[in-house]
Amino acid sequence: MEKGFLDMVENNAAVRAWSEMTHHEKGDSLAEGYVSKLWDFTRISVTQNSLQELKKIWDQWNNEVRQLFYSNYGDLPYMLDMEVDKHLFWALAQLWNPAYSCFTFEKVDLVLTVEEYMALLQCSKIQVDRVYSRAVNVPTFLKKLINITGMSEQWVVTRIKQKGDSKCIPWKNLKDVILAQPDTKKRVDVFALIMYGLVIFPKALGHVDEAVTDLFDRLDRGVTLVPAILVETFSYFWRDDISEEKWMAILQNLREEDVEWRAPWLLSDEILYRCGDFDWVPLLGIWEAVGYAPLLVLRQYRSRQFIPATHGLAEFEFSYKGDGY
């Protein structure tokens, strides 16, 4: 993504002209005879890590340490109080539209947006035009953990575990670092690493994956991890008193007037709807890449909705392993 892609804000007429031109030239993936190359299933897990011990550590910190965390890593601690409704997740999985990479509820579509995640993170160190991507030559997992924790090589070596096809470190070992490390910044860094590993990018329960440390190692350079988060998550919702069947009934009967498109806490005067001349943007995660159609989100910001050209979307979907990578 080139530097300066948010330098120019265009009005609705300019967006419409560009949208109509690209749709006329490229067409729609849902045209007659189109066969989707995307996966025909959605894999979703609602199993969560227990965050009570992590929350207890946060509650014991004084305001000075907390402010250091906020200035370096934004509003991540608010996620400690977040509960995921598994019934809603299962209902949403059935309403995922792979052709457009959005949720479709009758006549209402919902797309997770870059702008929303930027507002949620509230991290002043993020540079929106410096996106995280998986580097070719990176320090080893061992060296990254030594740098982040400040612990000895021997201490780290004995605690690295193999989980499936990747290396991890148990989060309880990292908790021990927080409790024993005299360096306040190191304690804050390790706490943030655990948040990324257990809450934002969970893989093996109770462990922080090597891929998470790769992303974390590069945050000091000001990169934004928002696209990576969009790749790995759908959304978070809170309600424990509604069954999957009730959620399906609610979602399938949504009307446009039932949806509040603009979040009251989101103040954004720059909306990403394209990247250069590309109507689809490849979002790079820590394990895979997916396609993202920012043009679909305009209605969520009280602007006119346009249908994007979707041919080529399948080429943006791949994992960082196997013959296709």
Image: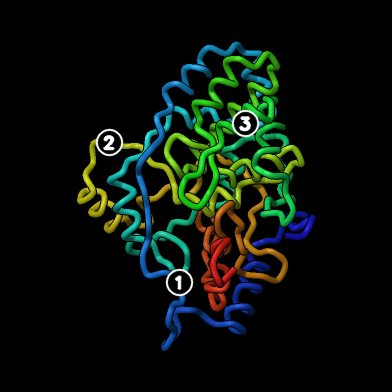
Mark 2 and mark 1: Cα distance apart in space: 32 Å
Residue 239 versus residue 259: which sits nearer the camera? 239
Q: Does 29 sit above or below residue 50? A: below
The x and y percentages for residue 141 are 65, 42
Secondary structure of residue under mark 1: loop
Q: Which residue carries the number 1 mark?
A: 38
Return the mark for residue 240: 2
Q: Quadrant of the N terminus?
A: bottom right
Crowding around mark 2 (Cα neighbors within 10 Å: few <14, some 14 to 19, many 20+) is few
Q: Is any part of residue 172 visible from this angle?
A: yes
Secondary structure of residue under mark 3: helix
Q: Are marks 2 and 1 in contact (CB under 8 Å)?
A: no
Q: Is any part of residue 292 visible from this angle?
A: no
Is residue 215 shown left or right of residue 94? right
What type is the residue that disc 3 sits on?
A: Val
Return the mark for residue 156: 3
Task: State which tag comes first along the sequence, 3 or 1.
Answer: 1
The x and y percentages for residue 4 are 79, 55
What type is the residue that disc 1 sits on?
A: Leu
